[in-house]
Amino acid sequence: MESKIKLSECFWLQGELARIQLFLPVSKALEARGVRPHILPAKSDRDGWRALKELLWKTDRHVMLHGLRADELKHLHPLFKERRNFSVFLVDWWTSPFWFTRNAEYCLFHLYGGIAARTKGARFCNDWSPPLFSLPERLVPYEFASAALRPAALLAQPYLNWRDQCLRSKDVVRPERLIYYPIPIIAEDLPFQEEPPEHDICSIATTNGFWVMRDPYAPAKYNFVNLYSDRKRLLDLSLQLEGRPYKFFDRRRHRGNFSWESYCQALRRSRFAISTGGVHEASVPKYMEYICLGTPLIGSKLPYEFPWADECLFPIDCLHVTPEELKHKLKEAFELQPRLRQNCLALRDTLLRMYDPVRLFDMAQDQIDGKPVQPGYLRNA
């Protein structure tokens, strides 16, 4: 196999997740570069699986696995264990089966934390000490299942720690195979227009995030705990000041479907939006979305990515700020809000160019060809 690949010449295999909002910009870049991805058939579609296997064995094209859930990758494992010649796209990298990450020719990381954990010794969640249990907030089966499985995860933790240490000790890190591919955004999805503010603070992101740690660079102690505890704590503390004098938009109060149009409108009508990457400091696209809609941020800076966000964000230590400290910090934030908003408006066009799907697709190819990440995407790049 050649040591380098051409993304536009790969056999792109996508799963069901590729149809959700997060993955659509990458699909747009594929379309612009003349790539027609193949969609993974349903598990019950035996004829579809048979045809896919025959197709993959007949071609020597490099396969790019994109938008695949852990269970879909597990189903593909016997095939690629023999065939190899694949690369993998990673979003929530800590949830992906490690066999694919370890054996892929290239790993394309949407979140730089996965690269930092391998090359810089970065500690997932900064070795945060999670609570023993995290209770679900919504009537969602997955959240209840996560809470119910937490005791079993605690019992299994010593064995999982030993297993992860063994896997890390045997892992051969090849930095040139770790590609940073930021999450793209589509300009048409973020229409800006002036709207009179109705809320002082908007919280529109989920405050519950439960995962299974399948990657050994993410400690087992975080299985089935809420990694959005920082975001939840900041919101809950802030709500103690509701009506004294602040008005809030809390997504948790709006049950049922919440359209993308409603999402954008709620942000445009808010003076600030709570934005954190979670305790695991993930570079979620909401940082870009909020700024492009003209709404400054209250929350946490990211350690590796989005250096431009500093001009639009009022930083708060979400895990440790006290109620009394928060009261004073919010007062300071609102004094700075007009300047932070102007910074958002000035940055919008730049972000839409920087995170254009086709530009990021080409930047990933440049890294594969040996070029560095372009300036502006990473801190101290």
Image: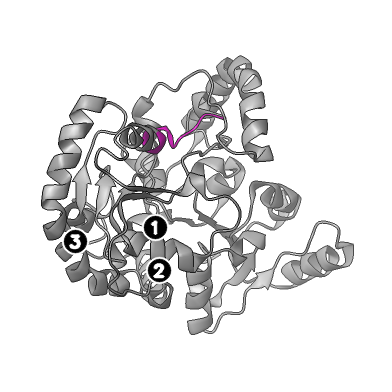
Q: Secondary structure at mark 1?
A: loop
* Side of 301 where 117 appears, left or right: right
Which region shows up in magenta? 224-232
- Label 3 near label 2: C-beta < 8 Å? no
Q: Return the residue at label 1.
A: 285
Q: CA distance from mark 1 to mark 2?
A: 8 Å
User: Is there CB contact under 8 Å for labels 1 and 2?
Assistant: yes
Q: Is residue 64 visible?
A: no
**Residue at left 77%, top 68%?**
52
Pinpoint residue 5: horizontal percent, then vertical percent.
49, 69
- Label 2 environment density (alpha carbons within 10 Å; few <14, some 14–19, many ≥20): many
Rendered image: mark on residue 185: 2
Mark 1 Cα-neighbour bin, 10 Å: few <14, some 14–19, many ≥20? some
How far apart in space, not on screen, are marks 2 and 3 (Cα)?
Answer: 20 Å
Q: Which residue is mark 3?
A: 341
Point out the tag, 1 or 3, that comes first from the N-terminus.
1
- The dot on residue 352 is none
Residue 212 appears left or right of 339:
right
